Image: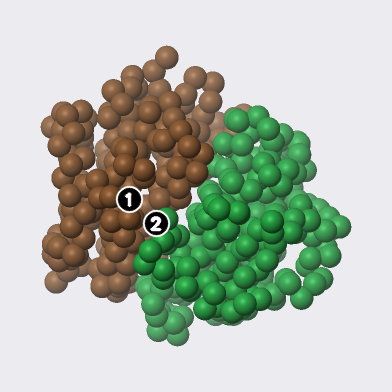
Chain colours: A green, B brown
């Protein structure tokens, strides 16, 4: 049975981390809100009878199981898609990296929404400028140095035990989003994070990922998503 | 062998979610940075030779395994401490709840640090006032309504399958922190979230938790931690 992925239909969103794993594994999946419309997703999120509703999208339906939270979805999918090692310590470590990627994704999001999710960016631009400035000066270098360290200690080409995992795909997506949103900062930081830059290139060139990225299924980054390019952030 | 927990020594921190699980299970553990000082923790965080360093504290040493990220620590500890069901779907659901608790904890933290971790609260007070206002008006009600829904669908006394899990202990800690930081808002919201309020009371009265809370091991909330009481937030 096909996996059903639910996420906002007009942006990459956090669902993109799941989509990349499904695409790399050539898994059969339906991108429900893109194909059937947003109401098909909202009916589930707002169903008062559902005993285990996700708090927010993305969420995945895998047969009878419904799971929300991007990192939990990948924890569930990883073994089934062959995108995580079999050793329990490797699985936990892969998940720990994923959770740290999720933390950085949340911080990248909050550069344009430092005050309130419920307000547009235009209603919080002065706060956003301060937060984005700190993110570029401090947080991007701190997080990227950690990923660079992990790659160095793991031999360079993959984050965990020399084999491709969903964490590698997610680090690709994180770097790709940051390159879109903060090109000047990332140009500098990636110069000091050569192994992260190489991993980003290598994932982009994997055959199924390259096919996916060239397909209409890969939505372009835009200023409604998590990673937004506002030139004033790096002015 | 005793578990070793590492976290900032002068605040409850995210380590408190782990501490509550260890205390409820009467597990043998050492609170390393509190007992041996912060340098004992920093040596690990800053060790350039460590292949799998956590990005930040808290982290836990369990024999040869070191694991960071609060939710991942509890994912690892839950089965060993008897604080999660044996059914894989229950385990994943408990983890999904924990990740949503973690999201709310991060938002609670950012009420006083909406611009930059690297700056003190005093350097970001106008932004903090706006973010805290939105958090009280919108986010506390949204998250609490979700927890209330889960408890209602699960029969009221526990979040997952009618038995105590680490997610119940974590929801207690979250509510306890919010009651400290936002007493006026929480007074109102808990009136409409009776089952959440009852769970908070019930966990507080569990014998080992009550003993722990009355001990010197339970640090008081303070204005260096995640949950901070700034009267201007609810003025």
State the residue in front, A97 or A233: A97
**Whole-Å distance between the Cαs marked 1 and 2?**
7 Å
Q: Quadrant of residue B164?
A: top left
Q: Which residue is depicted at the point 31% across and 60% down?
A: B149
Quarter of the picture holding the C terminus of chain A: bottom right
* Residue A30 image offset from top left, x and y in percent: 68, 66
Label 1 marks which chain's residue? B
Question: Is residue A99 rendered to the left or right of residue A163?
Answer: left
Q: Which residue is depicted at the point 35% across and 39% down?
A: B166
* Residue A98 image offset from top left, x and y in percent: 58, 48
Task: Looking at this view, name the residue that lies furthest to the bottom.
Answer: A122
Mark 1, secondary structure of its residue: helix
Q: Is residue A118 above or below residue B47?
A: below
State the residue in front, B233 or B177: B177
State the residue in front, B188 or A235: B188
State the residue in front, A131 or A34: A34
* Residue B156 image offset from top left, x and y in percent: 25, 50
Do pointers 1 and 2 mark residues of a single chain? no
The residue identified by callout 1 is B154
* Residue B230 image offset from top left, x and y in percent: 18, 61
Label 2 marks which chain's residue? A
Tag of residue A51: 2
Quarter of the picture holding the N terminus of chain A: bottom right
Q: Is residue B235 above or below residue A94?
A: below
Do the residues under discs 1 and 2 have CB atoms within 8 angstroms?
A: yes
Task: Looking at this view, name the residue that lies furthest to the right.
Answer: A207
Question: Is residue A149 rendered to the left or right of residue B122?
Answer: right
Q: Which residue is depicted at the point 33% across and 29% down?
A: B22
Q: Which residue is depicted at the point 42% across and 45% down?
A: B94
Q: Residues within 10 Å of mark 2 (few under 14, many from 20)?
A: few
Q: Is residue B69 visible?
A: no
Q: Is residue B84 visible?
A: yes
């Amino acid at each position: 049975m096909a996996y059903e992925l639910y996420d906002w239909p007009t942006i990459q969103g956090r669902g993109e981390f799941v989509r990349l794993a499904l695409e790399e594994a050539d898994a059969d999946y339906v991108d429900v809100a893109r194909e059937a419309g947003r109401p098909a997703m909202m009916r589930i999120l707002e169903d008062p009878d559902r005993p285990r509703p996700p708090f927010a999208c993305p969420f995945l339906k895998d047969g009878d199981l419904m799971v929300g939270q991007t990192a939990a979805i990948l924890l569930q999918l990883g073994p089934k898609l062959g995108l995580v090692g079999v050793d329990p310590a490797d699985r936990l470590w892969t998940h720990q990296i994923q959770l740290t990627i999720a933390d950085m994704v949340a911080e990248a999001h909050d550069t344009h929404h430092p005050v309130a999710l419920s307000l547009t960016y235009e209603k919080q631009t002065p706060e956003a400028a301060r937060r984005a400035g700190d993110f570029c000066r401090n947080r991007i270098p701190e997080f990227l140095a950690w990923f660079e360290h992990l790659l160095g200690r793991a031999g360079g080409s993959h984050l965990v035990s020399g084999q491709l995992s969903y964490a590698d795909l997610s680090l690709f997506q994180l770097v790709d989003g940051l390159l879109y949103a903060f090109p000047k900062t990332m140009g500098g930081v990636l110069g000091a994070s050569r192994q992260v830059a190489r991993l980003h290139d290598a994932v982009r060139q994997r055959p199924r990922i390259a096919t996916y990225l060239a397909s209409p299924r890969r939505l372009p980054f835009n200023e409604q998503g998590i990673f937004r390019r506002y030139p004033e952030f790096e002015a």
